[in-house]
Image: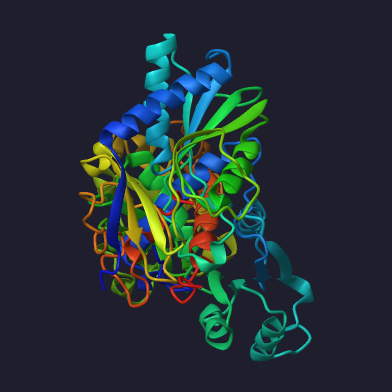
Amino acid sequence: MAFNHKHLYDIREYSCDDIMRILETAVKFKEVNERKIKKLPTLKGFTVINMFNEPSTRTRSSFELAEKRLSCDSLNFGGSSTSAVKGESLVDTIETLNAYKVDMVIVRDKHAGVPQLIAEHTGAGVIDAGDGKHQHPTQALLDLYSIWEKLGRLEGLHVGVVGDIGHSRVCGSLIPALKTVGATVTVVAPPTLLPARPDILGADHVSSKLDEVLPELDVVYMLRIQRERLEGAPYPSLREYNLLFGLTQRREALMKPDAIICHPGPINRGVELDSYMADHAQRSVILDQVYAGILTRMAALYLLLGGSEDGLTA
Amino acid sequence: MNDNQVKSVCMDAAEIERSLTRIAHQILEANHGAENLALVGIVTRGDILARMLVERIAGIEGCKVPLGSLDISFYRDDFLTHLSPELHGTDIAFDIRGKKIVLVDDVLYTGRTIRAALEALMDLGRPSEVQLAVLVDRGHRELPIKPDYVGKNVPSSKDENVRLFLEEVDGCSRVEILNMPPGTRVGSAPLGSGQPGIVPLGSGPLGSGQPGSASLGSAPASTGGE
């Protein structure tokens, strides 16, 4: 069965079937990841470059593990040694990658649109591992996987995304993906942390009152509050933020009995989440999300690098 | 478009039943009973055959040997030229270490599926022994692989496809030889692909056939048939 995508830099190009195909493929990789030997020979001979031009620990290590478990050859490119520091233009860097004859480039960059630019200038496939405040599609896929696995469905769920919507690339992929699979989305944030046009993200409702929205939600998705971004200008204090928008033990009484808590990590304990909620055995799926990151990235690599229709009769 | 034509039926339901009964007896005879034995079928037809063999062995020997199913999609040697194969998953709930494993597949052809299955199996543990049971051996081996138990040897041409249909997923049990235009891919029919003799084009996951690839509808399930 063909998977008609070569790149993953805009989740809005993926249909509900495409997204579910990735999630269902990830389930098969879960069986492999439960084994003592977690390595498969499937992508032997493929070369993948991890081009991280911005600090990343989790996303990069998750991609690296996914690549290794599928037997890809992978190479890390970027960081402080990045050619951009030495003055090379992005297009020249892309030409260099082309000369390496790689099959897939995983891109993290502080500028929105870089993954797409690379995709347009190279024959390799491109996966966006987070670009500026734009998108982070594999994060959305792992979030959907975790919710789907825990609650058994995605369609008809009501998901509340709480926090710094305006600065979040996680939202840029998560909200459209949730809409594609038929969920209802409410964004909850102080007005100063909302984008100028929250409707563009596709959310169904916008609210600034967590306590009013909480009883409706099946999934409470807490975004990370970046301390340096918050304190001072957009909001008076972290303490006040925690009182009004933090998911704290006190607020559990407002939640549905089976509502779950997601967070993309790393957590700022005591700001957006308190330890009671972050470590809640029944509700928190935060560590399941980390695990799902490997499974869904293995699935994305597997499907995107899969044979083309041209190769069918070869 | 519909170039896959049924040329002949080489096994009917009764013959399949008799072959399985004989293979069950042969497995028990060669292994001196069912002790330490386990059966692993390759999806998407071998797993069903393996279950039928386990039932027969239980009928003869009075004990149920462990049964598992193996999806070899991740171990194929033709990933580059294949559309991402449809995944069914591996389900082996017992520890294969030290066991005598009988691998079960529907049609043995090039031997490449079996090579992949052996590699997949070894990643799960170290069985003491692996044997191979197939319902049909159609020849044309490309690798040094030989079955231990064969339902029927069916001489075939490379332009043909040999396919097993089973009552519980296809509504009727039989083995068919189909004519195939050159360049198309051999493979099992998708599960539940309808009555034998009705070529499963268009009922495959892709929805419709494509020029130059008449067996496209069945390609995704081609984890067997080799």
* Quarter of the rendering occupied by the N terminus of chain A: bottom left
* Residue A12 relative to residue A167: left or right: left
Visible in this render: residue B214?
A: yes
Position of A116 relative to A298 (above/below)? below
Q: Residue placed at 75% from the left, 78% from the top?
A: A82
Given residues A149 and A110, the one toward you in this image is A149
Given residues A204 and B123, the one toward you in this image is B123
Residue A39 location (% of width, % of height): 65, 47
Which quadrant of the figure has residue A209?
bottom left
What number of labels is visible? 0
Residue B35 location (% of width, % of height): 56, 13
Extreme residue toward the front, this view: B155
Q: Residue placed at 32% from the left, 33% from the top?
A: B15
Visible in this render: residue A222?
A: no
Residue A126 location (% of width, % of height): 55, 74
Residue A101 location (% of width, % of height): 68, 79
